[in-house]
Image: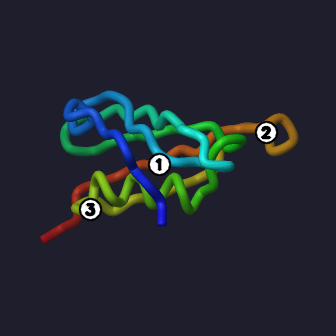
């Protein structure tokens, strides 16, 4: 299970979400929120897609979350997620 051990209250607006990453490291996920939609990013070298998605799902259970990898695969990259409020 992924341990989201610290989420600043401001993360619902914009801020940082701290999650457990690879090798039990602490990973910062940067979150920007505009009009209920959020964009989140984290370095692919420190967190898996599953860990990234799980952390965001715990903080934003009421959002549909789409995750994609950005950047060059051989040179690292980052996870980018977009979350929109669920309909209904």
Mark 1: give few (<14), some (14-19) or many (20+) Cα within 10 Å: many
**Rendered image quadrant of residue 75:** top right
Q: Is residue 72 above or below residue 49?
A: above
**Rendered image quadrant of residue 77:** top right
Q: Residue at x 39, y 50 (%)?
A: 4
Q: Using the image as rendered, state which of residue 79 and residue 26 is in the foreground.
A: 26
Q: Residue furthest right?
A: 74
Mark 3: give few (<14), some (14-19) or many (20+) Cα within 10 Å: some
Q: Is residue 60 left or right of residue 65?
A: left
Q: Earlier in the sequence, mark 2 or mark 3?
A: 3
Give the label on residue 48, or none.
none
Q: Which residue is mark 3?
A: 61
What whole-number distance in Å separates the C-alpha atoms at marks 2 and 1?
17 Å
Q: Residue furthest left?
A: 88
Q: Is residue 14 left or right of residue 18?
A: left
Q: Which residue is mark 2?
A: 72
What whole-number distance in Å separates the C-alpha atoms at marks 3 and 1?
14 Å
Give the label on residue 81, or none.
1
Q: Residue at x 59, y 57 (%)?
A: 49
Q: Is residue 14 above or below residue 20?
A: above
Q: Which is closer to the viewer, label 2 or label 3?
A: 3
Q: Earlier in the sequence, mark 3 or mark 1?
A: 3
Q: Is residue 34 above or below residue 4?
A: above
**Rendered image quadrant of residue 17:** top left
Q: Residue furthest front?
A: 24
Mark 3, secondary structure of its residue: loop
Q: Is residue 21 above or below residue 63?
A: above
Q: Earlier in the sequence, mark 2 or mark 1?
A: 2
Q: Position of residue 6 (x, y in %)?
A: 34, 40
Q: Using the image as rendered, state which of residue 12 and residue 64 is in the foreground.
A: 12
Mark 2, secondary structure of its residue: loop
Q: Position of residue 16 (x, y in %)?
A: 38, 31
């Amino acid at each position: 299970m992924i341990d989201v051990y610290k989420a600043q209250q401001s993360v619902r607006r914009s801020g940082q979400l701290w999650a457990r990453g690879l090798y039990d490291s602490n990973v910062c996920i940067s979150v920007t929120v505009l009009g209920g939609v959020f964009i989140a990013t984290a370095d692919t070298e420190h967190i898996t897609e599953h860990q990234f998605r799980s952390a965001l799902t715990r903080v934003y259970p009421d959002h549909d979350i789409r995750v994609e990898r950005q950047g060059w695969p051989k040179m690292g990259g980052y996870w980018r997620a977009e979350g929109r409020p669920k309909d209904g």
